[in-house]
Amino acid sequence: MIVRHFLLDVNEVNAFVVGCPETKEAMLIDAGAYDDAVAQFLKEQGLTLKTVFITHDHYDHTDGLGEYVTHYSADVIASIPKVQGHKVAKQVKHGDTVRVGNLTGTVYETPGHTPEGVSLAFPGCVFTGDALFAGSVGGTASEADKQRQLDAIRKYIFTLPPETQVHVGHGPSSTVAIESRYNPFFV
């Protein structure tokens, strides 16, 4: 599996390209801004961007969506029917699978930061958007939302293998082992 991180200018948001080395199909996870570095990486690796997966509908994760859809004719995958005015090709819910070539990922509902928040796990890594950060979690509007978010992370993310890489919406990546043991929101 090919995984490449890109730090975008808008709110220092992270975007990730996941690619299948056999089929050369790729997915972009979150599209905060169009970035030539993403296009260059896809070209260098011979990857074809087929889909854009949106973890949650905040501008810093979606503002570049239109350019990726237009430039690559990429389909949008999200847990809501429309993102940035673009009809979602595949609306996902908890437990659904998402394919990138020969790779299969599993969708986990991780609401709290936003009601529609989802994470996407492939073997060895999970993309959590703003639900979980290294040493923190995404902000919530209420104590009830915070509890829903923490419960979902405990139930779905922290039950992944400890060595699973946690790729987050902002800041550095981490692992399930580190976050489940040392993240102050969970200890």
Image (cartoon, rainbow, N blue to C red):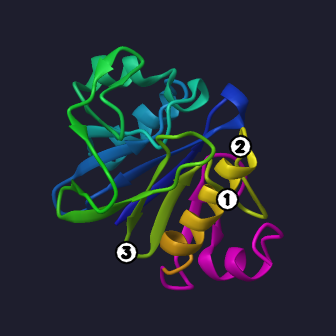
Quadrant where the image shows the N terminus: bottom left
Residue 170 drawn at (x, y percent): 68, 46
Examine the structure image and report whether residue 177 is included in the region drawn in magenta.
yes
Q: Residues within 10 Å of mark 2 (few under 14, many from 20)?
A: some
The correct choice, above or below, for 72 with respect to 44 in the image is above
Left of 162 or right of it: where is 79? left
Q: Nearer the viewer, mark 2 or mark 3?
A: 2
Marks 1 and 3: which is nearer the front? Answer: 1
Which three-letter amino acid code belongs to the residue tagged 2?
Answer: Thr
- Residues drawn in magenta: 160-187
Observer-nearest of 72 and 141: 141
- Residue denoted by label 2: 140
* Label 1 sits on residue: 147
Name the residue nearer the viewer: 158 or 121.
Answer: 158
Instruction: Left or right? Give the position of 13 relative to 162.
Output: right
User: Which label is found at residue 123?
Assistant: 3
Q: CA distance from mark 2 to mark 3?
A: 28 Å
